[in-house]
Image (spheres, rainbow, N blue to C red):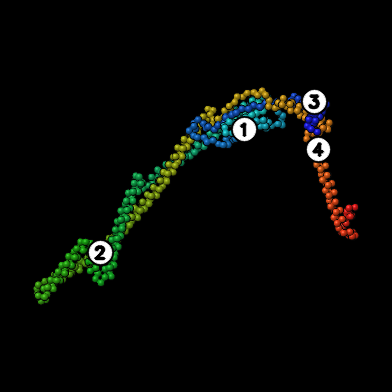
Amino acid sequence: MNETTLTQIYFGAIKKWWGLLFAAAACAIVPAVLYLQNTDSIFETQIRTLIQNNGLAVDASKTHSKDKNFLSTQSEIIRSPLIIRRSFDILSPASSLELDVDPVVHVTKRLFVSPLVSTDIVRLSYRDSDPKRSVLRLQAIIESYQQYLQEVEQSTSDETVELLEKQQIKLTQQRDFLEKSLAELRQESPFIGEMRDSIRTETTTLKGLTNRLIVASSKSSHLESILKTQQHSSSPLASVAMQIGNINAEMSRSLRDLQSNLSQAESDVQKISRVFGPLHPERKQAEDRANALESQYSNALSQAAISMKQQLEIAKSEQAHLQKLHDEERNRLSTLDAFLLREEKLNSELNRVNQSYESTVAQVRQKQLNKQALAGGQVSIVVQVLDEFTIPQTPVWPQPIPLLISCGFLGLLLGFIVIVFIEKLPLPGMQSFDSVISEETETSRENISATGRHNLDSYIQQQEKQPQHPQPVSSAGITGETLLR
């Protein structure tokens, strides 16, 4: 059966059962008409709103970085129960709502907020059976959102100003305390004028005392070594004469003169002794002079030894005195260093507090300006409605014409299916499928018959070629003749 014949059959069935098709379409359209008469029309109001975080006018010098999640956050705030509940203060919930229905949930289900990609624009849409009320509700939500932003910023600004003022008072108290401590430290300081100048003066004095102490210590050590050498020497007076030159130049010069005169007198005695006898007056005079010089030289050496001991005592006393002065000066310098360290610490802390105080004062001034700007109606987050609020005229649901057309087409389709079952009409494509199955079945049967006959003929030929002798039937199987039977 070809497609042309099948089409003719379908048209014939449709002409025969056209009343059934009409009745099915009518049965599908009537409920749609009843639904349109009994259901409420849903109107949708859509607007686009610009939301930007630009900061206040007094903060124009600051750069406000864009937050990727800013619009998403604001969208969730707009459709939050907080904003919706605040909008009821502007526009009360619909009186037609049942008592067990939460008005917040009712509005949330009909409110749609979606940020537009790569823009600062948010699309808001609200659906309601009353077109005018849908516009008013959307206006109330946007107005409540703007009031919320202003109240939040005002509250945050008030809290910030209060905290900054408390911090300013605290910093003022710290500054006064540090200035008082610094003044008391300067009064307690034993030095006059600037401490740094005093430190430089005291450091110079300490260096001078150190040098003098080093010289006195060296002199005392030298005298001690001379006296120790004199004690262990076989001729102590001679050793004194040799080393006193480093201690007392004048005494050393006197000793050298006496030693020279004594040597000259002894030389004269030796010369006269070669000429005159022991009783000669000139020889006696020379010997008396040499004895007098020797006695004078011995007395001078004794005085030099005594002088060296006295100088050693003086050197030790001077060394002790210089050590005492050095220790006192060192202690004074240490005390001054401690005062200077405390002063620097207080000055550093005072500078830090002053910087914090100045920064806090500037922030308080800035926040007070922000507070005044907020009181004047300015907000950092700008909310601007880009579209006009117009009352929608066409409902988004239900739409009568598309609904009726869809129901009528569905009714016709159901009626056609009923006609197909009543007339037992073949479906398109089923005829070719049945013919193919029949042809394949016949071919399979012919192949099976031919194969069976061929196998049987082959078996008979094999049996004829084998020798004829009786084959007993065993318990394990049967013969070929039994199979043939």
Q: Name the residue under label 1.
A: 114
- Distance CA(mark 2)–CA(mark 1): 110 Å
Q: Kindly identify the residue that appears in the image at 88 percent across and 53 percent down.
A: 483
Q: Kindly identify the residue that appears in the image at 67 percent across and 30 percent down.
A: 110
Number of other residues with Cα within 10 Å of mark 4, as a class: few under 14, some 14 to 19, many 20 or more: few
Q: Which of 85 and 7 is in front in this view?
A: 7
Q: Name the residue under label 3.
A: 22
Comparing marks 4 and 1, which lies closer to the viewer?
4
Visible in this render: residue 224? yes
Q: Where is residue 13 in the image (x, y as percent from the top left)?
A: 82, 28
Q: Which of 141 and 480 is in front in this view?
A: 480
Q: What residue type is labelled 2?
A: Met
Label 4 close to label 2 by CB (< 8 Å): no
Q: Kindly identify the residue that appears in the image at 41 percent across and 47 percent down.
A: 342
Q: Kindly identify the residue that appears in the image at 88 percent across and 56 percent down.
A: 479
Tag of residue 435: 4
Q: Where is residue 433 in the image (x, y as percent from the top left)?
A: 79, 38
Label 2 close to label 1 by CB (< 8 Å): no
Label 1 close to label 3 by CB (< 8 Å): no
Q: Name the residue under label 2.
A: 308
From the viewer's perspective, is residue 480 above or below residue 349?
below
Q: Which amino acid does label 3 sit on?
A: Phe
Secondary structure beneath dot 2 equals helix
Visible in this render: residue 40? no
